[in-house]
Amino acid sequence: MNLSDKKFVTTGNKDGLSSDQTIFHYFQNGSAISGNYSGGAIQKGYVVGKQVEESKIDLLFQCLTTEGELKAGASKGTISETADGRL
């Protein structure tokens, strides 16, 4: 699985700021991942991380919310494939 130049939305993130209105745009070189995101409660955000398994990623993030707050932290994610082949 390669995430380079792929766009995603979050599903099942009930405790976080990102929502199905937040669009993540990822780039990948080997196991290294970088990207940016915005939408919903996020004005602008950036991620850096790594692919740790075929469908698992570990990320560090920082963002500016639409309320003017700066946020940063870590996230673990799972990338899944839909029946029609989308990631």
Image (cartoon, helix red, strand yellow):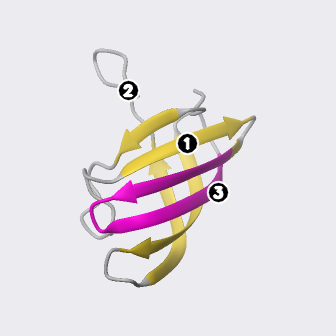
Magenta-span inclusion, residue 36: yes
Report the residue at 53% width, 53% height from top.
Answer: 36
**In screen coordinates, is 18 left or right of 27?**
left
* Label of residue 48 in the image: 3
Amino acid type at circle 3 is: Val
Of residue 56 and residue 13, the one placed in the foreground of this image is 13
Report the residue at 64% width, 49% height from top.
Answer: 34
The residue under label 2 is 81
What residue span does the magenta drawing correspond to? 33-51
**In screen coordinates, is 18 left or right of 56?**
left
Alpha carbon separation for disc pair 3 and 1: 9 Å
Q: Main secondary structure of the magenta part?
A: strand
Amino acid type at circle 1 is: Tyr
Q: Secondary structure beneath disc 1?
A: strand
Report the residue at 56% width, 33% height from top.
Answer: 3
Which quarter of the picture shows residue 69?
A: bottom left
User: Which of pointers 2 and 1 indicates the residue nearer the eye?
Assistant: 1
Chain-order first, disc 3 or disc 1: 1
